[in-house]
Image (cartoon, coloured by chain):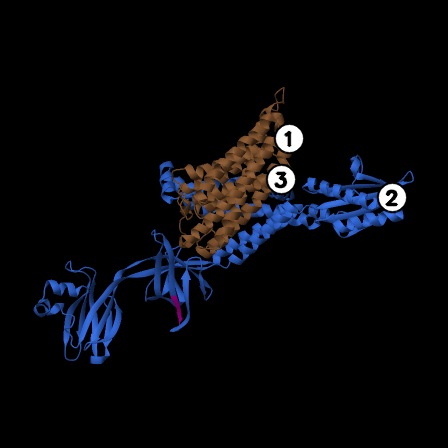
Amino acid sequence: MNHTLILSWVTFVYFASFVLYLFRLIIGKEVWGRLASLLAWAGLIAQTIALILRWKNSYDLGMGHVPLANLYESMIFFAWTIILIYLIIEWRTKSRIIGVFIVPIAFLAMAYASIAPDISNRIEPLIPALQSNWLTSHVVTCFMGYAAFTIAFGCGLIYLLKNKEKGLEKPAGFSAKLPDFATLDTLIYQSITLGFVFLTIGIMTGSVWAHYAWGSYWSWDPKETWSLITWLVYAILLHSRYVRGWRGKRMAILAIIGFGCVLFTYLGVNYLPGLHSYLKA
Amino acid sequence: MSIEKHSLWSFFSSVKLTITLLVLIVLLFIAGTFISSPDVVETFADHLSPGAGKVFLFLGLSDLYHSSLFYILLTLLSLNLIICSINRFPAIWRQYNAPYFPEPDGIFDNLPQGRIITADKEVGKIKPIVESCLKKNYGRISEIEELRGHLFYAQRGRFSVFGVYIIHLSILIMIAGAVIGSVFGLAADINIKEGESVNVANLTKSNGLYKLDFSIRCDKFTVEFYKDGTPKTYRSDLSFIKNGQVERQGTLLVNHPLAFEGLRIYQSTYGIAPEIKAIVTYTNAGKKDGSMTLAAGDTFYLPQSKARGFVLRVEENIMQIGPAVKLRIVSQKKDVQFWVFQNLDQIVVANPDLLTKMPLFNPGLFQPFVFSLKRLEQTYYTGLHLVCDPGVPLVALGGLLMVLGLIIVFFIPYQRLWVFMKPKDAKISISIAGRSNRNNQQLQKKIDYLCKRINEEIKA
């Protein structure tokens, strides 16, 4: 079976899973949630198979490389890591509530990868600079980090949404079904620590790679600089939490700002000139 | 004086300063990624006033990452880090050496139901059970016999209080590595044509030259493409020559640098040199005799007739009839010049009496040799990047320490646990309570598990 076909189905499956999470939230019956999780797991497994097929396919085409080499492949992998980390959190916390905010992000990434006119889904050969064993570890750790920050962003959104309704007379209804503030705060903090460790390792593997490829572990390329900006923004967040005791709403806002930096590092930077320009579709 | 010093000290030991500096650095980086060309800044400064230009120049706004502004911020941040670390050390040390006994005030007050176990067995039987359960989960334990009862203490991850120090130290180490690299490091570029050896490189950051203790010869440069035209391989076959001896030969690929005499050599670029190489073969009295790769200006020697040859011209397309080389051959008896065409056969078919009419076009003019041009080849030059960065080991060490520190800080909490056994109405009550510097949830789960185990063991 063709991996592109599987990936289009997976996009659809993630959307269906999101709709079911929404049903669960609105109707309040756990059966919808169970179905939603089931679909998300099915999607993840199918996507894993599709990624392996694409990998194999690249060997058949005589340019064998991991499917992490261009914008399309990174986008698909981004969606994969988001779902993976989300499902682990769902399994660990035994709570399905944040799924309704996280799964659609994975769906959007998948949809954007296949719909955006300037993203080609063809398997492309690796240029010499990318032919390195560091490619996999660099990309995997970076995207694990991005995905964890995405979870923090989703929880931050929920926090602000819930916070808006806090003053209202009847906190029942939609807001009451959202997780409580303490849980959200913990989730934001824990995803950010996870993301921070992955981003740190991602930047380091990138540095090692740059040391071997370009002869310098740091070249102030816009993508490098923006990854450092993202790292610093989350470092500021962590310090204000540890030392100044910032919690709740401020954390939520910083998590959203941090995610903005992640997106700019990932996508926005491609519009600036630099060494990472092969990621341009 | 002392007050001033004190206030300066407290200024540098504040976390507000850290956060302010980090925000400023972030803003500088953002500006840096958008101001890509120095011209933009200069034009902007000129618009403001003639003085602004000087200020801008001093702050180095045209190259923010190497500007005095950035170095000042980095110095302040390093000072801030060091002073914060010194300032906080006594508290951390106290935390590390906190006494086990007595337990923190009120730690056993208001414990939830599950955290107090009552057993009606005697102390002598209960104590080993509690002890072994604690030991299994925490390793070494301490205990103290008091009038009010028996107190156990266990801990885990005590060293994690130093995790923050490891991270901050790692940042200072990396900054030190970067400074060492920029002061003592070397980066230079060198372009070498195939067949040529070079021992002078251009410094990357300035216009200066750097003389190497050895020379590098490019034996061959190869570029390969995929079917769709994407470059697949850039490869330079290099020889390192010292005192006229080839000391080392190696193949240089992107992502696979070579090292020689403390320098790392990287494949950075390539290009096509202006001159073209001609692959020329010749026969001697009808027998195949030799093959040569020649460029314009080269000379060669024909030992069989003690003649010397000169390559006068190498042309890609002369007179619209294709590639040709013009040779001059000088021996004791003769001095001739003639063209050697690659497509001679076709030319002769079109003009059958060409060779007799125009001896200049006869590749066999220097008898008994007959030359022929097999093909022309482009000469490549390879662009090498030479680096020596003595700061790299420090930066790498800093990176490793940082990851280690982050893992300790985020994932290894400092957990302390007290278990208090006291007789109560002919029974024994066991209370369990704990403290954790972070991730309290995990500790609570652990205590729940411990309570469950002790309960089970007592019943058994």
| Image point (55%, 33%), residue name | A101
Q: Which of labels 1 and 3 is toward the front?
A: 3
| Image point (73%, 47%), residue name | B94
Chain bearing mark 1:
A
Q: Which chain is brown?
A: A
Image side of residue B286 versus residue B25, left or right: left
| Mark 2 neighbour density, 10 Å: few (under 14) some (14–19) many (20 or more) | some
Q: Amino acid at mark 1?
A: Asp
For the residues marked 1 and 2, what is the alpha-carbon distance in whole angstroms?
Answer: 40 Å
The residue beneath circle 3 is A91
* Quarter containing the N terminus of chain B: top right
Chain bearing mark 3:
A
The answer to which of marks 1 and 3 sits earlier in the sequence is 3
Image position of B363 with respect to B255: above or below: below
For the residues marked 3 and 2, what is the alpha-carbon distance in whole angstroms?
Answer: 42 Å
Question: Is disc 3 on the same chain as disc 1?
Answer: yes
SS under mark 2: loop
The residue beneath circle 1 is A180
From the top left corner, tell me how far across and down residue B36 is, in percent.
Answer: 40, 44
Q: Which residues are magenta?
A: B238-242
The residue beneath circle 2 is B149
Image side of residue B40 versus residue B343, left or right: right
